Amino acid sequence: MSDDSRPSPSATPSAARTAAVIPAAGRGVRLGPGAPKALRALGGTPMLIHAVRAMAASRAVSLVVVVAPPEGAAEVKSLLDAHALPERTDFLVVPGGQTRKESVKLGLDALPAGHDIVLVHDAARPLVPVDTVDAVIEAVREGAPAVVPALPLADTVKQVEPAGTPGEPEPVVATPDRARLRAVQTPQGFDRATLVRAHETVTGDVTDDAGMVEQLGLTVVAVPGHEEAFKVTRPLDLVLAEAVLARRRLNDGF
Ligand code: C5P
């Protein structure tokens, strides 16, 4: 809970002009065989539904656009229809592309006029708390063209010369100063026109949307992220996500 006395975006629904795009079209191969990652169950509910609810939990978010696997758009639409979501929030499902970047662009193309702030949130981060979502929106409202939630690193990071063969020793070429590094999460928040321009201008694949805004020469700012906004990538992440959900249910019970 924020102890800040300023009204949070959640408390000002009249200014609700934020849309969230959720790219959920990846196969999630690192999680092992099975359903596309976004459709894996967490606490009995598909990961994607958790991610949609996490965005809709912010009262500032009035539209969620889910970018679905192209062959699974109808299934995703029925999933959204079958799960309770806040009445104040509208939903759209569009088919995704070959890469995350293409999928985000397809989601942006589907946005109606009137949403000046856009969040891009990975379906693979189902447990991001609403305070983090609101902090990102607030920083965009205060004038930042792009905002990322970020955390300091626990591990020291080495830059290596990647070995051609997996498992072979790799020469270390540099050790960046850990105090200046951050691990970046989602939702990332954008002034809509800036994000559209970034997608129209920047070529080449990127691992996050804010990186494209950096390539435009604009300043991206980082706000505090949250440890529960971690990305479910490997099987162990599923165990952690289940534990976080179980703890939340226990706490909600009191
Ligand atoms: O692969 P990675 O974990 O970086 O994917 C991040 C997000 O991008 C996931 O939510 C995934 O579903 C999405 N994605 C997508 N379209 C693709 C590839 C990934 O929407 N073609």
Image: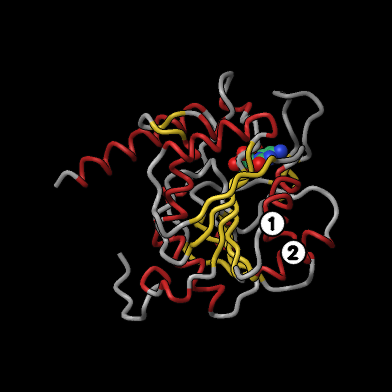
Residue depicted at 47% across the width and 36% down the height: 47
User: x and y percent of residue 42 in the render?
Assistant: 41, 32
Q: Quadrant of the N terminus?
A: bottom left
Q: Is residue 7 above or below residue 208?
A: below
Q: Secondary structure at mark 1?
A: helix
Which residue is situated farthest in the top direction here?
Answer: 33
Q: Residue 100 location, x and y as percent?
A: 70, 44
For the point 71% across and 64% down, which residue is it?
195
Q: Which residue is mark 1?
A: 108
Are discs 2 and 1 less than 8 Å apart at CB?
yes
Q: Position of residue 223 (x, y in %)?
A: 51, 67
Numbered circles on residues, count: 2
| Residue hosting label 2 | 196
Q: Quadrant of residue 134?
A: bottom left
N-terminal of the two: label 2 or label 1?
1
181 on left or right of 227: right
